[in-house]
Each structure stands twice: as C-alpha cells, then as structure tokens.
Image (tube, grey):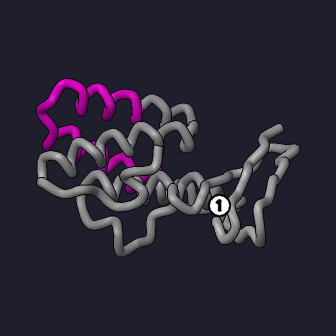
C-alpha cells in the first residue's frame, strides 16, 4: 500500500492518467500501479540532452507497458551513447546501476538513477537542469 499526499493543484500520473488534487489530498494506492508525481514527469520538449532523452524513454517504458519493447530499444541505444560519452566514475557507475534497474524492469528506481545523470550533465553543460532533473 502506498500513500501519496498532494498539495492543492499538484498533479500525479497513475497508469498514464493525469490526476490533479483539489485541496490537500491523500491518496492510498492499494495495488501496484505506475505512479509519478507531476515534478517527476518530463515533457517531450524537455528531453533535449542525452541524459534527458534517456530519462524520457525510461519514463515512457514505466508509464506505457504496452509499448515497453520499443521504449526498451530506445533506452539501450541512448544508454550506449551516454556510456560512451561520460568519463566521471560516479556517472559511469550511475549508468551501470541504471542499466541493472532497467534489466530488472524497475523503471521507477531507474528514473531516480537517471536524475543523477541529468544533474551530472547539467553541471558539465553549465545549466541548472529542468524540473525533472531536480526532483529527488
């Protein structure tokens, strides 16, 4: 069982459906579901760097089980490109952990690991990251 507390106006995605709280709301999920808070959701136009594209593909695999095979293929290609590009040990370790989590179909935890890569990438590029990059 999972309890999610939402502030007034906060969004949550449950199995692909976007829900918005009206007033302070507590939701109890009593079975397994794909759940992302609004700040964890990345819009397609925000997937504009290698790590962000990887996050978006993983998010889609998590939220769209029917299309998971095509998302998995995209993840493998994007991850391969990212592994070849990163040099920092902690970023390479994050790639390895991400790969393990995706192989285990633990997409939610893989998204958290990918946020580490987005943060690393933002520091290298001198940016401050998008909302999904800062959700922890």
Residue 103 picture location, percent across and down: 49, 34
The residue located at (39%, 51%) in the rendering is 134
Near-viewer residue (101 or 123): 123
Q: Quadrant of the N terminus?
A: top right
Q: Is residue 99 above or below residue 7?
A: above
The residue located at (34%, 39%) in the rendering is 116
Q: Give the number of callouts.
A: 1
Q: Is residue 75 left or right of residue 119?
A: right
Q: Residue furthest right?
A: 30
The image quadrant that residue 37 belongs to is: bottom right
Q: Main secondary structure of the magenta part?
A: helix
The residue located at (21%, 48%) in the rendering is 121
Label 1: few (<14), some or many (≥20) within 10 Å?
few
Q: Is residue 125 left or right of residue 100?
A: left
Near-viewer residue (98 or 14): 14
Residue 83 picture location, percent across and down: 22, 38
Tell me the residue that label 1 is attached to.
66
Residue 129 picture location, percent across and down: 29, 57
Specify start and end residues of the magenta stretch as a single range.
72-99
Residue 54 picture location, percent across and down: 35, 53
Magenta span includes 81: yes
Near-viewer residue (131 or 113): 131
Q: Is residue 53 above or below residue 84?
A: below
| Secondary structure at numbered mark 1 | helix
The residue located at (38%, 56%) in the rendering is 74
Q: Is residue 58 above or below residue 100?
A: below
């Amino acid at each position: 069982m999972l309890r999610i507390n939402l502030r007034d106006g906060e969004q949550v995605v449950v199995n692909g459906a976007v829900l918005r709280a009206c007033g302070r709301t507590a939701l109890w999920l009593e079975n397994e579901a794909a759940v992302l808070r609004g700040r964890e959701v990345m819009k397609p136009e925000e997937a504009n760097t290698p790590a962000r594209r990887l996050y978006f593909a993983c998010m889609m695999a998590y939220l769209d089980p029917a299309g998971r095979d095509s998302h998995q293929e995209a993840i493998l290609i994007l991850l391969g490109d990212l592994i070849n590009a990163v040099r920092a040990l902690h970023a390479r370790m994050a790639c390895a952990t991400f790969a393990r989590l995706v192989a285990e179909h633990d997409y939610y935890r893989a998204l958290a690991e990918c946020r580490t890569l987005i943060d690393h990438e933002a520091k290298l590029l001198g940016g401050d990251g998008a909302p999904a990059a800062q959700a922890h």
